[in-house]
Image (cartoon, rainbow, N blue to C red):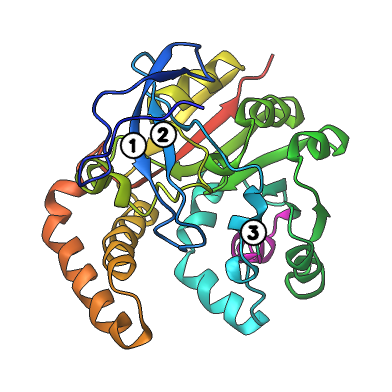
Amino acid sequence: MIVGPAPTPDGMAHSSPGRACPACGTLSPIAIVAKDVNRAISNHEFHYARCPACGLLFLTDPPENLSAFYADDYYQTPTAERIAYVARREHYQVEVLLRNIAPPARVVEIGAAWGVFAWQAKHSGYDVHAIEMDSRCCHHLKGVVGVSATCSDRPDQVLADLPPSGAIVMWQVLEHLTDPASVLDASVSNLAPGGVLVIATPNPESMGMRLMGARWPHLDAPRHLMLIPPALLGRWCLERGLEQVSIDDTDVGARRWNRFAWQRMLLNRVRGRAASLPLRVAGAALSAAVSPWETKPGRGSSYTAVFRKIPT
């Protein structure tokens, strides 16, 4: 096991041994030593390396019991009324789809959780199928959201058995996957010609990452295994026969994830229900203060990428 140097106060390890990048094989130094600051399930230190060639930020030592870091309250099963309320606030997601492919196209959502996007897509006229590894969420997706669902932690295998799709979407999912390349391969194979792939994922080149380091909530050690720079994701998709339609880290979703990062960073430092509201207000104010810089292209905490399968 490779152990890096003692981290600096921000958790950044500026000189260390390295690991081979899973994307390109380049020896990559340990860049960040982080703990599970978001959920505090363990006090263990985790090591992230950053590839000097392709920019991939990846966890070098994922725990063998990774499922233990997804506590019972990680997934929620709200009422239909609550889903409808949240879906209205998150309507930008289905707007991305509507701009790129019209209903009643078949849409597969990977990592649907309790179904906010699936609800939006269904009520916008799409034929929705969800792939979700949590059995409780799958039951909820079928019974409450009203979409078909497959319970599996191998979306690549599920996609191989599904009919062709007009769109495949992943909202904050790619970073959790142990083998994102296989899921991209399966997605491209499943997409019908002209179909679209929509991916939203944390931006390891963001302003928040640079300022907060190991305390950046979107690092989310150890649940986030790989954080993929926008240019690298674009290259991966181009190599698989997809053309880039758009990559945006200044959209509504990115701005919300920016605010979340500042709020969560403060909440992680001072835990307790009494402090929650003041810290959320303070985090929102801090986010607003840095917004003129953080909302410039390339600096957002998350980006949404759209790719289209090139017809042959």
Name the N-terminal-most of marks 1 and 3. Answer: 1
Residue 246, image x, y percentages: 42, 34
Quadrant location, the C terminus? top right
Q: Which mark is drawn over residue 32?
A: 1
Q: Secondary structure at mark 1?
A: strand
Image-quadrant location for residue 191: top right
Query: Which residue type does callout 2 highlight?
Result: Tyr
Residue 19, image x, y percentages: 46, 19
Image-quadrant location for residue 196: top right
Query: Which residue type does callout 1 highlight?
Result: Ile
Residue position for label 2: 48
Cα–Cα span, label 3 and label 2: 35 Å
* Left or right position of 178 against 271: right
* Left or right position of 140 against 194: right
Q: Secondary structure at mark 3?
A: helix
Name the N-terminal-most of marks 2 and 1. Answer: 1
Name the N-terminal-most of marks 3 and 2. Answer: 2
* Left or right position of 138 against 290: right
For the residue pair 12 and 260, the one nearer the viewer reads as 12
Q: Residue at x 45, y 56 (%)?
A: 43
Cα–Cα span, label 2 and label 1: 5 Å
The crowd level at tag 2 (other Cα within 10 Å; few <14, some 14-19, many 20+) is: many
Residue 12 shows in the view: yes
Q: Secondary structure at mark 2?
A: strand
Q: Which mark is drawn over residue 121?
A: 3
Q: Residue at x 48, y 18 (%)?
A: 21
Taking 24 as reference, is 133 above or below it? below
Query: Which residue type does callout 3 highlight?
Result: Ala
Image-quadrant location for residue 249: top left
Q: Inspect the magenta stretch and tell me whether residue 250 lies in it.
A: no
Magenta segment, which residues? 114-127
Q: Which mark is drawn over residue 111?
A: none
